[in-house]
Amino acid sequence: MSEAKHSTEPFKKSDLTRARCAFRVEVISGSDQGLVRTVDDNDLERVLLGTGPACALRLTDRFASRRHVALSLMGTSLNIVDLESTNGTFVNGVRITGALLVGGEIIRLGSSELHVTKTDATKPKIVATGTRFGRVIGASEAMRKLYPTCQRLAERDVPVLIEGETGTGKELLAESLHEASGRAEQPFVVFDCSTVASNLLESRLFGHDRGAFTGANAMRKGVFELAHRGTLFIDEIGDLDVTLQPRLLRAIERGEVARLGSEKWFRVDVRVIAATRRDLDRAVQEGRFRDDLFFRLAVGRLELPPLRRRTGDITLLAAHFWRELAAHPGAMLPADLMRRLEEHSWPGNVRELRNAIARHDALGEFQEGAAADSPPPSTPTALQPDFVTSILEQDLPLSRAKQELARSFEPLYLERVLARNNGNIRLAAQEAGVARRYFNVLLARHR
């Protein structure tokens, strides 16, 4: 399939066109009567309604949830999704989990009623003309709407929170923001909260002096010091232990850190970009994430759309990955393969698509639905002694080391048992001696 239809021009400027339509949402009864919010094509994220501070239409109704519903424009309709609210969402008296509205409906949240009206857009629609921002590629409208905001945030030295499903490219966007900023020549340091043992998090963040704890045989700088004058990307911030969040907040607000075992404070000049796959608003509501840290991080807030909402980007990205990964990139991707790629739902998003292209280049295959349900049959690499050594060299606690070993062994086992059963999940689960549902859970874990 030809890729001549798409270009990968970098973001340059904004193209102003008229938005197709907009929806006016007005509270007509309840404690917040008179509040109005318009939803149009310029909303980069879902518009949240509820009592939480992250909501664009914030209610004081005590029967409404912190994040009650999300609204977004979908073509010429308004998409409404209930966010697992406590008391439910009702449209024209019918309880819904999701619906498309056309205007004229009455939404009930808690004890409040809201009227939806379809209107003509009054603000110009802002969409970038280019099809990429730094290393982030996408020609879909969902992505091009992000680029002007990304450029503005890159030029301003403020914290940024990037939200999105696993595999949407959050780290790549963070790196692109760094490279487009005034700190581009300085360090870009990555710290992943989900890959560090809980008892080592504080030391990795802030460093430690010699003798600070058993095994601390030398002074070690933390990631804040390593990122001095540059950018610190904190991935999976939602996994950070709540007991460490006050220290992180102080480091961001005051630009000061102290190593473990030391009373000396160091000044650090660091821009923080954080990312999460989790619902931080819900984590704040449940007390698992500090609201003051949340607001400090979310000065700039970006939500990366999943690949299934990026119309047209699968072909563009597949061609890009093919050029990047293929042993013979001059060859064209087969048309039937491109068709199957377009039809797949990509629950693993861009990362899953990239892996599928790499697999096709290596093995010459793409199994329909394989990326969602199972790895395509193949012969896995045996577990080598140096693999075990690599885990031992991390000096992890025994329980964490066992977890790492199991996490790395499981996908090899799953791939092997699937290969013996020609990719049949039911037969593979029987051979593995587990229920099919649990087998699917394991597959999803290692997708």
Image: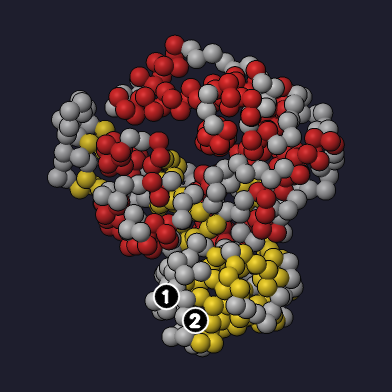
Which quarter of the rendered picture does the N terminus lie within? top right
Whole-Å distance between the Cαs marked 1 and 2? Answer: 9 Å
Q: Is residue 171 left or right of residue 73?
A: left
Q: Position of residue 20 (x, y in %)?
A: 74, 73
Which picture quadrant has residue 382? top right
> Where is mark 1, residue-wise?
63
Of pointers 1 and 2, the one earlier in the residue sequence: 1
Can you name the residue that lies furthest to the top here? 385
Q: Percent from the top left, x then y, of residue 270? A: 37, 50
Dot label at residue 221: none
Residue 155 rendering spot, x and y as whole percentages: 51, 58
Q: Please tell me which residue lies in front, 335 or 411.
A: 411
Q: Is residue 349 above or below residue 425?
A: below
- Up-down: is 185 above or below 46? above
CB atoms of marks 1 and 2 within 8 Å: yes
Residue density around tag 2, few if under 14, some if 14–19, many if 20 or more, within 10 Å: many
**Residue placed under numbered mark 2 in the picture:** 112
**In front of the other: 365 or 236:** 365
Q: Residue 99, located in which quarter of the rendered image? A: bottom right
Residue 250 in sight here: yes
Tell me the kind of residue under disc 1.
Phe
Tell me, yes or no, if residue 182 can be seen here. no
